[in-house]
Image: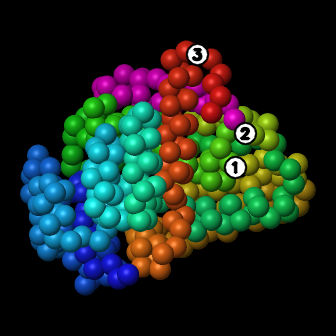
Amino acid sequence: MKLNRIAIVGLGSIGKRHLRLIKEIRPNIKVTLIRSGVGPSSPEENMAERVVFSIEEALKHDIDAAIISSPAPFHVSQAIILLKSGVHLLIEKPLSDRLDDLDNLVQVASKSNTKVMVGYVLRHDPAAIEFKKIIESDEIGDSMHISIECGSYLPDWRPGQDYKKTVSALSNLGGGVLLELSHELDYLHWFFGKPAFVFSRLKNSKTLEVDVEDQADMLFTTNSDIPVVMQIDFNRRHSLRICTLQTTKGELIWNAGEKSVEWKPSFGEAKKEIFDFNRDYIYKKQLEHFIDCVEKNIQPKVTLNDGVVVMKMIDSIRKSNLEQKIVAL
């Protein structure tokens, strides 16, 4: 089928990016914006064919696909309405703010003849793809230890906005570092498989004056009994996103900020490859892939099940923190 009409649910920062990039990739696609009516109007609305204030109204215009970029607590209910009408979906990460409402979504999706993709966009990062390729090459020895760090300063995320009033800072809108930085959980699963166990500590440092956790520290064990240390936070003034794999032959490092992959052998000269792309590139690749999935009937790189796996990891992390014990995933 040819994708001619697409809806975007929500026009926050990520919704605006999707709108702009869709018009760059496929200018002829007709875009319907679905807004809540809560926020102010935006100049980006002029790029769309129409603006409506409910999914039901959008469905009257025969949309083929939709991108759900509203706050996480609304994703599932919105997705179910669209799936029941045969609409293909790209659902922004995370799938939801809780695990207990996902069974219904999975059931509805399984009965619909639609493509459902989850927006873990780092799977389209060229450096991350190279990192995974090297891991799978069996040329760097046996894995011994994995370290993941990601942090940045929340007040700097959305210039010109009061960060305390943004989605990231409000628990009722799915905020908190665990949901907002769930990319780390997804690529842990993507690179190394779903972990077997987790012990976690979630903390609100009080430094940002928000009502969500702004720091999460986790110790996982993979199914191959490899330890994984993960630290994510909203407080780091110098942004960092890095994954280090220690092996019997050296260290393999993916540095997302540098857009680099570096191999440091135990003996010999280190090799670093730096990739040349901007942030829009990975979002364009994601959108192009979504369009291909719909038009060419191919399997998404990030499936609905992948999104569910991340939510199950989040549920186990929360349980471990609450009960202060090791939890099986």
Q: Position of residue 265 (x, y in %)?
A: 84, 57
The residue that label 2 is drawn on is 222
Residue 82 among magenta residues: no
- Answer with left or right where residue 30 lies relative to residue 91: left
Q: Position of residue 245 (x, y in %)?
A: 73, 49
The answer, for residue 48, to whether it is visible in the render is: yes
Give the vertical position of 216 relative to 298 (above or below).
Answer: above
Q: Amino acid at mark 1?
A: Phe
**Span colored in magenta:** 196-218
- Disc 1 crowd rating (10 Å Cα; few below 14, some 14-19, many 20+) is some
Q: Residue at x 57, y 22 (%)?
A: 320
Q: Earlier in the sequence, mark 3 or mark 1?
A: 1
- Disc 3 crowd rating (10 Å Cα; few below 14, some 14-19, many 20+) is few
The residue that label 1 is drawn on is 192
Q: Which of the 4 image quadrants contains residue 123?
A: bottom right
Most foreground residue, 267 or 27: 27
Gap in angstroms between the C-alphas marked 2 and 1? 8 Å
Q: Residue at x 62, y 65 (%)?
A: 129
Q: Amino acid at mark 2?
A: Thr
Q: Residue at x 11, y 69 (%)?
A: 50
* SS category of the residue bearing label 2: loop
Q: Position of residue 270 (x, y in %)?
A: 79, 61
Q: Marks 1 and 3: in contact by CB < 8 Å?
A: no
Q: Amino acid at mark 3?
A: Gln
The residue that label 3 is drawn on is 324
- Disc 2 crowd rating (10 Å Cα; few below 14, some 14-19, many 20+) is some
